[in-house]
Image: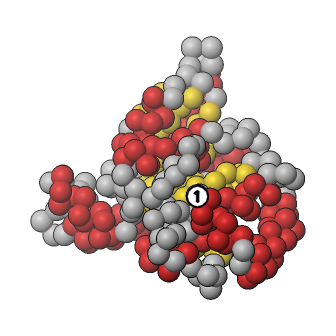
Amino acid sequence: MRLVIVSGRSGSGKSTALAVLEDNNFYCIDNLPASLLPELVNRTLLTAEQAPARLAVSIDARNQPQHLEQVPGLLASLKEKNIPFEILYLDADDATLLKRFSETRRRHPLTDHERSLSEALAYERELLQQLADAADITIDTTQLNLYQLGDLIKLRLLNKPASGTAFLLKSFGFKRGLPIEADFVLDVRNLPNPYWQPELRAYSGFQQPVIDYLDQQEEVQEMFADILHYLQKWLPRVGASNRAYVTIAIGCTGGQHRSVYMVERLAANLRQSMDNIQVRHRDAKAFQPGHESS
């Protein structure tokens, strides 16, 4: 049995996540009372022949606070029984969540005549902090639409290798903020910027004119060599600590040229000696076949 626990603040995309999982042969239960999780798992195991091989449950702030307080103990109980599970936690910044509720005119489950929407969001973060801290995968959906979120869940959750640490190299633009899930952040804004070459501005780091330009820059070669040496030395040691996912975020100003180039080139080299190398580009607008943005 594979168990996925989906959580996160209201408006962050939990319904989309469950829909993606359901489309991929998970039996999904929304708004499960946390206290019922052990019984659900036990019943599933007792009826293994008829039970779904893939089970996903959503546990969030619609639970009673006293039920959420039981979460650390419930998770510890699953671990003691050697029941494998993963926690997917979704969130977005407050301004984005406020906008989403305004656009859909939905009522936040924690609002009432004494608690405003912004106060409800802050309270919800507090209620779910233990699940957020325990999450195996955290996705910031601030800049994602429904399709991008679905693609990202498929990449991070459904296409992950059976064992070992999955290393995700992710390009981004600093002007849109840091990726919330980043474990390592590398800054390549000091490198020559193709954006300031008029003939290169419309291209991205996937495309040959930009690749040729950056390949000719001595400081690009120096930084690439330094970063590659660092990752080749330390990523295997990080993987030895039994972490399921490690995200290495590489940023330039807009996330179009230098960071994309560096991620693609590093991934190609790392794959020669390492398994489980994944690539993602958060802000790039132009893609080669097989690349998607998130």
Viewport quadrant of the N terminus: top right
Is 89 positioned to the left or the right of 33 in the image?
Answer: right
| Displayed quadrant of residue 23 | top left
Q: Is residue 159 above or below residue 272?
A: above
Q: Residue at x 60, y 66 (%)?
A: 210
Q: Secondary structure at mark 1?
A: loop
Residue type at numbered disc 1: Gln
Could you tell me residue 230's position as x and y percent? 82, 73
Q: Residue at x 85, y 71 (%)?
A: 229
| Displayed quadrant of residue 263 | bottom right
Determine the residue located farthest toward the left in the rendered image.
113
Q: Is residue 184 above or below residue 192?
A: above
**27 or 186: which is nearer to us?**
186
Determine the residue located farthest toward the top in the rendered image.
49
Could you tell me residue 187's position as x and y percent? 62, 79
Determine the residue located farthest toward the front in the rendered image.
199
Label 1 neighbourhood size at 10 Å, few (<14), some (14-19), many (20+)? some
Is 181 positioned to the left or the right of 123 in the image?
Answer: right
Could you tell me residue 278's position as x and y percent? 67, 51
Colour setup of the view: secondary structure
**201 or 220: which is nearer to us?**
201
Q: Is residue 98 above or below residue 289?
A: below
Q: Residue at x 55, y 22 (%)?
A: 52
Q: Is residue 5 visible?
A: no
**66 or 100: which is nearer to us?**
100
Residue that label 1 marks: 207
Q: Is residue 277 above or below residue 160?
A: below
Is 223 positioned to the left or the right of 107 in the image?
Answer: right
Could you tell me residue 194's position as x and y percent? 55, 75
Q: Is residue 51 visible?
A: yes
